[in-house]
Image (cartoon, rainbow, N blue to C red):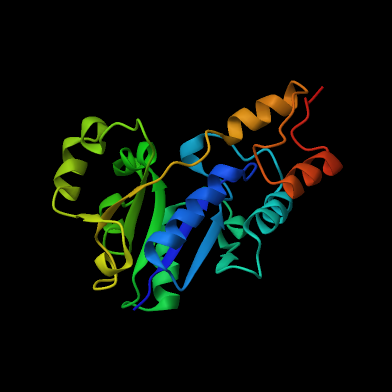
Amino acid sequence: MKPIVLFGGTFDPVHHGHVAIAQAAADAFDPQKIIVLPAGNPYQRGRMPLAKAGDRVAMLSMAMGLGATKVVIDKRELHRTGPTYTFDTLRELRNELGEKIPLIWLIGSDAFAKIDTWKDWSMLFELTHFAVVMRPGDAPIESSASADLNAMISTRYRFAGATDVDKSPAGCVILLKTIPPKVSSTDIRARLENGEAIRGLLPNTVCDYIEQHRLYLPSS
């Protein structure tokens, strides 16, 4: 059974790195679809996204080329009040999609190394596989993960590829090695606040949208 890939984040704003990671997952897992889940109130970040939900969804739609790809946007986290918890999202998706279909949650290596600080973290492995995005130069997960997390994942590692995850619905940790562009939403926001160019860091349609709607400008 082909898996479904889940890609969460604030996407504030979406950029070429996000698009490259989604493409790497599509190539590695040949999923039925990739569900992108823009966060509402990501409590781990300690602040709300700067762009409004509608703007972030509009930019995601442009960047991911909806309609021509397997990518769809799921807005459920934007409609919640209070903090956004991945456990709640995964539990809802499991109830909707059934117990048998493989789910794969895309996550950066830094975030995954701290996943034991998330709500009900150990139960997440009963709901999904994790595809940990490993960029060149990233330290091994074991070097920064806690003893509890290392004990949890030590026997769960798999190679990237659909055949490694389509035999079970959840529980594996797949190292997805890729070389996405060196760009971050934080850097893009800083450039915009300082009046610097952002062309080449994100799709031109997203650049146009940011300029037209005057997003991420200095508050003064």
Q: Nearer the viewer, residue 6 or 78?
A: 6
Marks counted in the figure total 0
The N terminus lies in quadrant: bottom left
Is 67 situated left or right of 104 in this image? right
Q: In the figure, residue 183 lies in which quadrant?
A: top right
Q: What residue appears at the point 45 percent right and 54 percent down from the top-left corner?
A: 24
Q: Is residue 181 above or below residue 159?
A: above
Relative height, residue 51 to residue 54 (above, below): above
Question: Can residue 84 be seen from the camera position used here?
Answer: no
Q: Nearer the viewer, residue 23 or 139?
A: 23
Q: Quadrant of the C terminus?
A: top right
Judge left or right: residue 173 versus residue 63.
Answer: left
- Residue drawn 38% across and 64% down? 29
Q: Residue at x 19, y 55 (%)?
A: 156
User: In the displayed structure, would residue 218 be above or below residue 164?
Assistant: above
Q: Nearer the viewer, residue 60 or 42?
A: 60
Residue in view at x 56 percent, y 65 percent: 71
Residue at the limit of the structure toward the right, as seen here: 212
**Residue 15: quadrant of the picture:** top right
Which percent across, then down, holds residue 121? 30, 50
* Residue 174, horizontal then vertical, whole percent: 29, 54
Residue 51 left/right relative to 7: right
| Image x and y of residue 207, in percent | 75, 42
**Residue 19 seen from this side:** yes
In the rendered image, residue 27, in percent from the top left (x then y), is placed at 43, 61
Using the rendered view, name the quadrant where residue 51 is placed: top right
